[in-house]
Image: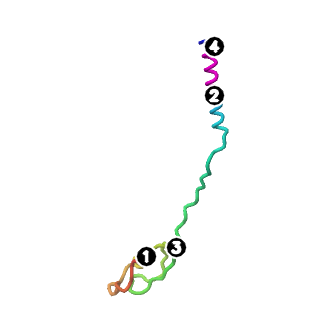
Amino acid sequence: MNKYMLVGFGVLVGLLAAGLLWITVSPPRGEPVTLLPTPTPELITIHVAGAVAAPGIYILPQDSRMVAAIEAAGGFLPTADSDQLNLAS
């Protein structure tokens, strides 16, 4: 190896070391990510009465429909007129 090759190799190694040092010392860019806790679903307490198998008070998720309340109460009795209710509400 001649003298110029050694100088060139030294400059190259120096530039690589300086770049590596600059990357490790520079502050991070952007904003930190904040992790939020998983929200717990809200519950509602309802009273189911009438022609159902087990009338009573039931606790269901907040976005439940009336059909879920009827199912929680054991379903309609044979004498029930389910057409009088909007089960999707």
Query: In the image shown, does 23 or 84 lie closer to the viewer?
Result: 23
Residue 19 position by quadrant: top right
Vertical side of 23 occupied by 66: above or below: below
How many neighbours does mark 4 have within 10 angstroms: few (below 14), some (14-19), or many (20 or more)? few
Seen at 51% across and 78% down, the residue is 45
> What residue would you read off at disc 3?
43
Instruction: Report the Cα–Cα distance between label 2 and label 1.
Output: 67 Å
> What residue would you read off at disc 1?
65
Ranked by sequence position, the earlier of labels 3 and 2 is 2
* Amino acid type shown at disc 3: Leu
Image location of residue 43, percent across then percent down: 52, 73
Mark 2 or 1, which is nearer the eye? 2
> What residue would you read off at disc 4?
3
C-beta proximity under 8 Å, tags 3 and 1: no
Ranked by sequence position, the earlier of labels 1 and 4 is 4
Vertical side of 81 occupied by 43: above or below: above
* Amino acid type shown at disc 4: Lys
Mark 3 or 1, which is nearer the eye? 1
Image location of residue 60, percent across then percent down: 48, 74
40 in the magenta segment? no
Q: Which residues are magenta?
A: 3-14
Q: Which residue reaches farthest front?
A: 4
